[in-house]
Amino acid sequence: MTIPEISAEDLATRLETGAQVIDVREPDEWDEAHLAGSYLIPLGQVVDRIDEIATGPSVYVICRSGVRSANACEYLRVQGIDAVNVTGGILAWLDAELPVECGPQ
C-alpha cells in the first residue's frame, strides 16, 4: 500500500486552514515538542481510539521521524480514513524551524 506523504513545510500551510494532525509519539516525546493544535494518540492506542479521529478531509499523522506515523497511516487508510504521513516527522518540522509548543496535552 502506498501511503501519501506531505512535507513539514506544506503541512504548515495546511494548518492555517484547520487541518487535523494526529501525533502518534509517546507522551514524554509530545511534552518535549509538538505542533500547535495536534492531538496526541500514541501508536499503541490508535486501534482503541480510532473513533477520536475525524473521517472528513485528510488527517495528517506525525511521529519522530516518519516510521510510526507511516504504520498508523497504513492502518487508518485500511479503515477508510484519508491519512497522510508527515515526511521526516517532528525532526523535519524542527529542521524547517517551524513553530512548536512544549508541555503536556
Image (cartoon, helix red, strand yellow):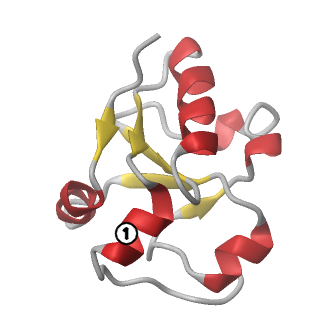
Q: For mark 1, does the 10 Å Cα neighbourhood hold few (<14), some (14 to 19), or many (20 or more) residues?
A: many
Whole-percent x and y of residue 100? 44, 83
Q: Nearer the viewer, residue 37 or 26?
A: 26
The relative height of residue 84 versus residue 27 in the rendered view (above or below) is above
Circle 1 sits on which residue? 93
The relative height of residue 53 versus residue 99 in the rendered view (above or below) is above
Picture residue at 47% right of the left edge, 10% below the top: 1
Picture residue at 42% right of the left edge, 53% below the top: 88
Whole-percent x and y of residue 57? 32, 35
Question: In the rendered view of the protein, which quadrant contains the C terminus?
Answer: bottom right
Residue 87 left/right relative to 78: left
Q: Is residue 105 visible?
A: no
Residue 84 left/right relative to 47: left
Q: Nearer the viewer, residue 100 or 104?
A: 100
Give the image quarter of residue 53. top right
Q: Is residue 8 visible?
A: yes
The relative height of residue 13 versus residue 78 in the rendered view (above or below) is below
Picture residue at 57% right of the left edge, 25% below the top: 76
The number of discs equals 1
Amino acid under label 1? Answer: Trp
Picture residue at 40% right of the left edge, 16% below the top: 2
Whole-percent x and y of residue 12? 24, 65
Q: Secondary structure at mark 1?
A: helix
Residue 17 left/right relative to 95: left
